[in-house]
Amino acid sequence: NLKALFRPCAMMVPDYAMIGEISLMSYGFSEARPLARKIVQTYTLCSEQLSSQDHYDYGMRAVKSVLTAAGALKRKFPEDDENLLVLRSIKDVNLPKFLSPDVPLFNGITSDLFPGITLPEPDYEEILSAAREACTELRLQPVDNFLAKVLELHEMVLVRHGLMIVGESFAAKTSCYRVLSRALSLLAEGGNPTEVKINTPTLNPKSVPLGRLYGEFDPVSHEWSDGILAVMFRSCCDDTSGERFWMVFDGPVDAIWIESMNTVLDDNKKLCLVSGEIISMSPRMNLLFEPMDLSVASPATVSRVGMVYMEPSQLGWRPLLASWLEALPPTVSETDKTLLQDLFEWLVEPCLFFVRKSCRAPVPAQDINLVQGLMRLLLAHLDAWRVAEVDQSRPVDSAKSADVLTCYFLFSLVWSLGCVVDDDGRSKFDTFLRSLLQKELPAELDIPGAPVLQVPPSSRPAGAIKASKLFPAGKTVYDVAIDCSSGAPQWRDWMSTICAYSVPKGARFHDINVPTIESVQVGYITDVLVKHSVPLLLTGNTGTGKTILLAQRLNELPSDAFQTIQLSFSAQTEARVTQSIVDSQLDKRRKGVYGPPYGKRAVVFIDDLNMPQPEEYGAQPPIELMRQWMDHGGWYDLKELFFRQLVDLQFVAAMGPPGGGRNHVTPRYMRHFNQLWLTDYSACSLERIFSTILAWHLADFGGDVKATCSKLVACTVAVYTTISAELLPTPAKSHYTFNLRDVAKVFQGVLQSSPKTIGGADEMLCLWQHECRRVFADRLVDDADSLWFTTLLDSQLKGAFNKDLATVTGGTTALYGDFMKDDSSLYERLPGMDVLTTKMSAMLDDFNAVSKRPMSLVLFPFAVEHVCRILRILKSPFGNALLVGVGGSGRQSLTTLATAVADFSLFQIELSKNYDTTAWREDLKVLLRKAGEMGESTVFLLSDVQIKDESYVEDLNNLLNAGEVPNLFAADEVSQIAETLTPVMKQEGGADFSPSGLWRLFVQRCRANMHIVLAMSPIGEAFRNRLRKFPSLVNCCTIDWFTAWPADALHTVAHSYFRDVEMEESTREAVVKACSFFQVSVREASQEFFSELRRHNYVTPTSYLELLGAFRSLLDVKRSEVSQAKSRYDVGLEKLQQTAESVEGMQAELIELQPKLVVATKETDELMVKIEKDSADAQQVRDKVEVEEAAATAKAEEATAIKVECEAGLAEALPALEASIQALQTLKKDDITEVKGMKNPPGGVKLTMEAVCIMNEVKPEKVPAPDGKGKVDDYWGPAKKMMSDSRFLQNLMDYNKDNIKPEIIEKIRVYTNNDAFDPELIKKASKACFGLCCWVRAMEVYDRVAKDVEPKRMRLAKAEAEFAEVSGLLAEKKEALAAVEAKINELQAQFTAADEKKKDLGQQVEDCSQKLDRAQTLIGGLGGEKDRWGASSAQLGEQLFNITGDVLIASGVVSYMGPFTAVFRERVTTRWIEYCRSEQIPCSSPFSLGATLGNPVKVREWNIDGLPNDSFSIDNGIVISYARRWPLMIDPQMQANKWIKTMCAAPKTAGLVTFKPSDGDFVRSLENAVQFGKPALLENVGEDIDPVLEPVLLKQIFKSGGVDSLRIGDSTVEYNPDFRFYITSKLTNPHYLPEVSVKVTLLNFMITPEGLQDQLLGIVVAKEKPELETEKSALILEAAGNKKQLKEIEDKILQVLSESEGN
């Protein structure tokens, strides 16, 4: 569909000869045509005869390069022979790129095309001398081949602005351009006017994310940020110094980044950035690319650049040796150097040849790399010569130096060239080297192509190695180490170089490290190389201890001289993260220079070096980042875009061999390392390790238990060896990878025993077999493998102890744990399964009692065993579990229970619509701080469906490996953690309180307290890929494989479900068996389904539980429904029978009632006349009473109004009065005393006391005025006397407020109107006066109000008296009226009774008549239904008899049959019917889901709404309506989609909400549908369902604020029970994994032949006869309406008949 939018256009290959002729003619060539043809013919012959290489290009651009070079030569030498010029240009352009085998062929082609023409040797003397000087400066050897390549590069730089130096590592590519740039710079310094200084800014483009390479727009702010390459390019272009710039791109060339350089590499010479900026390349710039090969470069790139190809074979290892010998300490004499050179010449080449031809190196290494490793290791042993150079007082003993150097050389030879091969290769190399040292010619060298053996002449003193200095006999060359501590070299056994080992008292299992010959060897080599700054790479199979050995050795390095940085690579490791981890642990030394703290060297340890997944074109960015440092001493800062030079840094690494998720690492990086292959531990070493540990543990046990030690270890090693060799991983069993960690886990389990629980040898053997099963057998996927393993254990026990497995275990399943006794933590054998199940059920009840999410689990033996397995893992130190099983198998529920039993806390993430990596990291912080900082034992349960991004697994990989996620915490959070853990460190007796020491404690606590449990499904590729990419998932976890539920589990769960269902015991047992049969038969049918139709269907325990739940709920409903329907028919028939019998009796009753009715009518009429007369008399009395009542009411209203007015007035005064009294009550005697004691009271106090004195009529004293003129009134003296009265406050409270004198009030108003007399102001002066002030003001208010209210009170009293008088008269009148009315009421009652009697008789006559009419109508109208109802009743009776079997099969169809096609549904249900009959379960034949669960009226509505009218589609509709889970419909023809949209459209529902997973706001749409009870349709889903839908699919409804709620993502939504959810997929054959299928009801809605026929007929008729189609649609609707109406009428009739009582 995309191709159709474009118009194709064919391009012809142009005529190169014509283009060449025209170009040559334009350059001034007279023989243009023949020369152009020769150029074209040269390339034609090269493409046919030379080898095919990625960097060879013979296209138009190659021709153009030759033409350009020829034109330049013509201008320079216009008089020279034109053939000569063209030949020279062809050779100059092409010769540098050819491999050495192709050069003679190329020369032959040119000599044939240009016969007799010999090129003169050009004069390169000046540049060659400068190149030799540059080689001396750079400590390189000016080898002829190398110098030739330097000249070729120089020639290429002159003619091409873009060029590539291609070749393997050790081809001297980097040295080539460095020598040339230095040589040209030397010429410029020497005054050569044509040359300038060369700068070579270098970048590995694959070490930088693409966005930071060229620049990128910020996705949020859309701001442009420059890239490193763009900044480098711009600075080179803008440089005005006149120097040349060669921008070197030292890294793989692939289409991801190089395509953006195409405009720079062609004639445009412009770098075009995404921002729109175009940077033109300056004339003084060249672009150098330094890839290993061009296997993934596009032809467009290859053709744009000049090529120089370099080969390691042209250089060899001898130039390295010459440079190395020159760099030796000056104290190494020339004689010793000659000796070393002779040894290299004699032994290196044969050993290299032998290693390549006869041995297998699991991790390939280049020859020169191995020789370089030999030189490094040998140099690391020459400390004595270095010391002698510095300290003259400690010279080297020249007499012994030759022997010492010879032994060191041999030792280094073994541990460089001989240590990269596997076990088998080592034994071969040992034999070969020994014969070589005895100057014999090994058979391996006596073949064509083998190197010539250069035996040193015996005449020279160093020529022959003394016999005493050869490797000792009886041991291999790998079993001995060289010891020169006594001066003379001696070969010693490795184990004799260390002290004897004994397990420390109180040691923990994971801290025990028993030395073996392998660990001693590796430890020594590691120490030597690390201390001499040599990069070391340990390689070996999983379980050989690479990580532990390196980590242990690095931890033992002196902390004042070394800093360790540990990284762990995985498939998802990013260069950016790796860089940030290293950068975060380095300090700034000076501008642009970073390193560890001064005086230290940082050792970066990279674990699983080869795990990073290669990109599309094969590059591994984290590896390229590391190579950037190895080759160029630093890397680029991704924010500031400058080059960070990293100093005092070295790398050590560990990795497994390539394969199984591990990848090949580029040789360009591997060349920097000394490689050491760790062979698998020998059986002897393994037995030594574990015998030492087990013997230490069994020291306090009985003698017979101790005696089992060595045999148990041997049996365990044998089991491990056998299972590793026999049970190999396959795609279906990708987790069948066993390593030595598994052996350790067995003994870790055995070490949990104690003398209290193990009384004898048999008990120890039983524990041992249990631990073997838990470690090895729990991961086995099928019964065949489990049986094989049981046989293996049995054979080991018989062979070593002469006992079989049944004897040891007592013939029962042996399980161990420490949870049975509340007061004990002993790891002991658990009691029988019944006791265990009871205990576990009690613990489940305890959990449910306190949990917010109680679990409804049925604990059968299978589940209990898995709980015990999980508990064992959680209780183990560093125990992590990988639970593998299909969705719904109970992995998460059982883990939750096990966590509760262990009394650990459970941690799980909650996915939301916005859940991303940031949220994941925040959750990890919470988890790690909980475990590491708070010290809380925590289980982190994570399901694979929660893994939204593979970076989550990367973080898990780090957690499992190291207990931390690098760079997870910010600096302030790290400080908080350190602060919290400082007291913990003191408490534990630690001494390292540095930040790094506290962080190590945090990580240790994380690892100790955190247990990761991963629940994964084995279905699909994800599981297999993750195991391959993240080896820690297998290495650091104990695997528990959840197989399908066994028969006893199915029976137990079914019994539990059906315990309360009403049925006979025999039927219940038969139904339980049938349910188990259904589960097994559908599993088999699913396999047939896949083999026949290649369609997947998974049968999970959830499907089984769905079957049980459906049967239990449907059985009662259908029983009730069918029995009710039958009862209604039976009642209807009974009523018809009764009606016919009642007609005669009703006719006789009617005749008898007629005379009684006449008498009753006459009596009623007479009574009515008397009542009318008495009623008229009573009315007159009533009128008088009403007049007087109105007058009394008016008086009452008047009194009420006056009363309200009085109360309103008092409402103003009373609150103030009460407040003042309260204020007085709060005053104490001390408060009054305080006021009284004031010598000079404030104005407010005096003012208050004056007012109080006036209120109490206390006279003032006359005192002199302040101005001295006359006297004034002063109340302070009298006030103090007044306050001295002990009843002062009580007098105020009892004050006669109703009779205050007017003159007092008049005086007081002066004060209350004074602003200073404000209680709030007075309160500031005195608390006591505040209360007195309030009292005075209240008295004033009360008096004012009381004077106003008093007249109203008098009026109120008068009004109330008048009202009382009127009320008395009114009461007398009412009594008279009541007597009259009572008489009338009595007459009325008599009349009512007589009238009722008359009506009743009339009604009886009427009813009798009507019943007679109805009976005749009923018999006439329903007489014809009698037969049909009888048949229906009989049919329903039969249906009721078969209801158990029918509902069972219907439940099976609803639970299992959704994904199957019609044929398979028929096939499976037929088997079920046969089985039910064989088990005496009554069921209908043939079975029909529609007949059992269908509603004909509903089905007709569905058909009208667009559901195809075939049984398959109708069954699907029934399944949708009865299934507990929401439906997911496989609907490629969109039948279901259309049906749902029509069925759920308004006004039938609240309105359908439709959305797709791709809609940005689909979660908001879903929330609205859930909240407002609308049906929702999710269309176009793929094979995965967004995790945010999980709460909706699982119906995780909970009460919030008393209402049903559902949590969708971050928000909690009120749940409306009218909500319906439908999902459709257009995929024709989707593969839904169990994790998806257990959450939904899968339905196959693909079109059937009947449905297709019906639809096609409809389409044809609609096209050909549209009026017929319209009429048909109308008729269908009408018929459906009529049938619906008919059914409703019948139901109504039956309902009326069944609900009517009596006649």
Image (cartoon, helix red, strand yellow):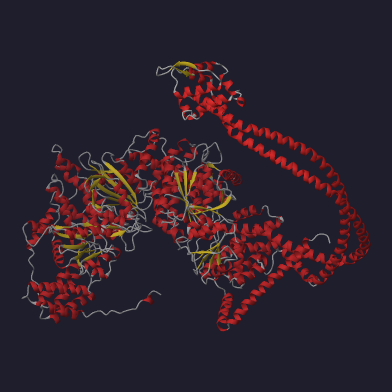
The image quadrant of residue 80 is bottom left
Determine whether, in the image, residue 1264 is placed left or right of residue 1193.
left
| Viewer-proximal residue among 1204 and 1403 | 1204
Residue 1024 makes an appearance in the image: yes
Instruction: Determine whether 1698 is above or below 395 in the image.
Output: below
Single out the residue that lies furthest toward the bottom. 1664
Which quarter of the rendered picture does the N terminus lie within? bottom left
Tell me the residue at 89%/58% (across/down): 1398
| Viewer-proximal residue among 49 and 90 | 90
Q: Where residue 1527 sits: x, y (%)?
A: 56, 63
Residue 804 makes an appearance in the image: no
Q: Where residue 571 sits: x, y (%)?
A: 37, 56
The image quadrant of residue 1431 is bottom right
Q: Where residue 301 sits: x, y (%)?
A: 25, 68
Could you tell me how many numbered marks the image carries?
0
Q: Where residue 223 sits: x, y (%)?
A: 31, 57
Which quarter of the rendered picture does the C terminus lie within? bottom right
Tell me the residue at 14%/78% (across/down): 24
| Viewer-proximal residue among 593 and 1683 | 1683
